[in-house]
Amino acid sequence: MIRYLIQFGIILFVCFLGDLLQSSLNIPVPGNIIGMLLLLILLLTGLLKMSMIEDVSNFMLKHLSFFFIPAAVGLLTCFSVLEGKWTELMFISVFSTFIIALVTGMTVQLLMKRRKAGE
Amino acid sequence: MSELASMFVESPVFGIGISLLAFYAGSLVYKRTASPLMNPLVLSMLMIIALLLAFHISFDDYNRGGRFISFFLGPATVILAVPLYRKISLLKENAVPILAGIGLGSAAGIASIILMCRLFNLDELVSVSMIPKSVTTPIGIEISGQLGGMPSITVAAIVFTGVTGVLLGPMVCRLFGIEDKVAIGVAIGTSSHALGTTKAVELGETEGAMSGLAIGIAGLVTVFLAPVLAELLM
């Protein structure tokens, strides 16, 4: 239990550093994203060992969608904004997913083929 | 409402309690059915919204407890570096195809969303909320807030994308002759984040790993692409 608390403390500290960097350097990227990049750099450089945050990260990642519940329930407050737009929004969701899968898949496949042909 | 009941509703215990209970129930249903449609987050959301509407409880009452849960969105975003770090070695061999695919795919996705929102005459608030709908939820919430959108709309669109993407991603690959395993994995992870990845894992080891790698990269790429494309196209 203590180990989990220490690990969570480290992650909170990285969060705080991200916010601090964001506000002091006025970077137009959300602080938590800067925190994520910071944690990635810390892990890649070995300044932070995976074992120092592993248990609490695994626990949170396993149940990640629990933390989105209040944001999802907040949809309740958007009903008036969304009135009469549900069909359009569902169409946009599905169609853009289609575009992303198609363009991404085609690009990767094409470049992989070229690379193999070049070898 | 009796005094005791209103006291309960006004305490943070209410929001936290029903969230835990709904998520527990949702997870049980998901385990029993093993269907992507029975997603625990979707079920929790529907149960709680139905409860709040049925008993005329305001979102603000619920969120007195809910905001304690939302506090964890920060750490939840930061720890996305962990799965990305674990998979980043997969980039070494095919960095250029993977990064180019995710970059182009995400850009095309954002552009298509903005253009369709204009076509349907949707207001700016709704449109910017839709922009990050294919990335993983914590990053999508961040981008939505950054662009001045409503993160709740973004979450709903993200979950809808994930649930439909489970079917759509593999279908697109089959229909358009995308057979390369790396390409299939990256396409699924970029278009439908962690929910799509559950399907990619079923397709095979390479597909699953590549899909998992694509979640984090697509999220980061979208953080930087979204404001630029929104500025250009809106």
Image (cartoon, rainbow, N blue to C red):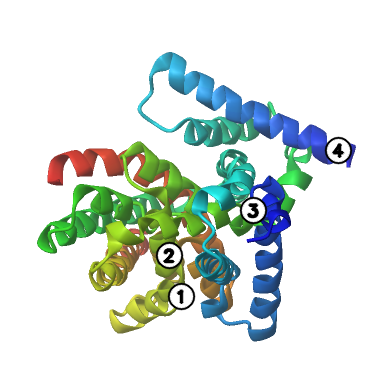
In the rendered image of this protein, does residue A85 appear above or below residue B202? above
In the rendered image of this protein, does residue B86 appear above or below residue A92? above
Residue depicted at x 18% and y 57%: B122
Marks 2,4: beta carbons within 8 A: no
- The residue carrying mark 1 is B166
Which chain hosts label 4?
A
Marks 2,1: beta carbons within 8 A: yes
- The residue carrying mark 4 is A3
Q: Nearer the viewer, residue B75 or B44?
A: B44
Same chain assignment for discs 3 and 4: no
N-terminal of the two: label 3 or label 2?
Answer: 3
Which chain hosts label 2?
B
Separation of marks 3 and 2 at Cα, in angstroms: 29 Å
Residue depicted at x 42% and y 53%: B152
Marks 3,2: beta carbons within 8 A: no
N-terminal of the two: label 3 or label 1?
Answer: 3
Same chain assignment for discs 3 and 2: yes
Separation of marks 2 and 4 at Cα, in angstroms: 34 Å
Separation of marks 2 and 1 at Cα, in angstroms: 7 Å
- The residue carrying mark 2 is B192
Which chain hosts label 1?
B
Q: Nearer the viewer, mark 3 or mark 2?
A: 3
Tag 2: amino acid: Ser
Q: Position of residue A92 (x, y in %)?
A: 25, 67
Which chain hosts label 3?
B
> Which numbered circle lies on residue B15?
3
Same chain assignment for discs 3 and 1: yes
Kind of element beneath mark 3 = helix
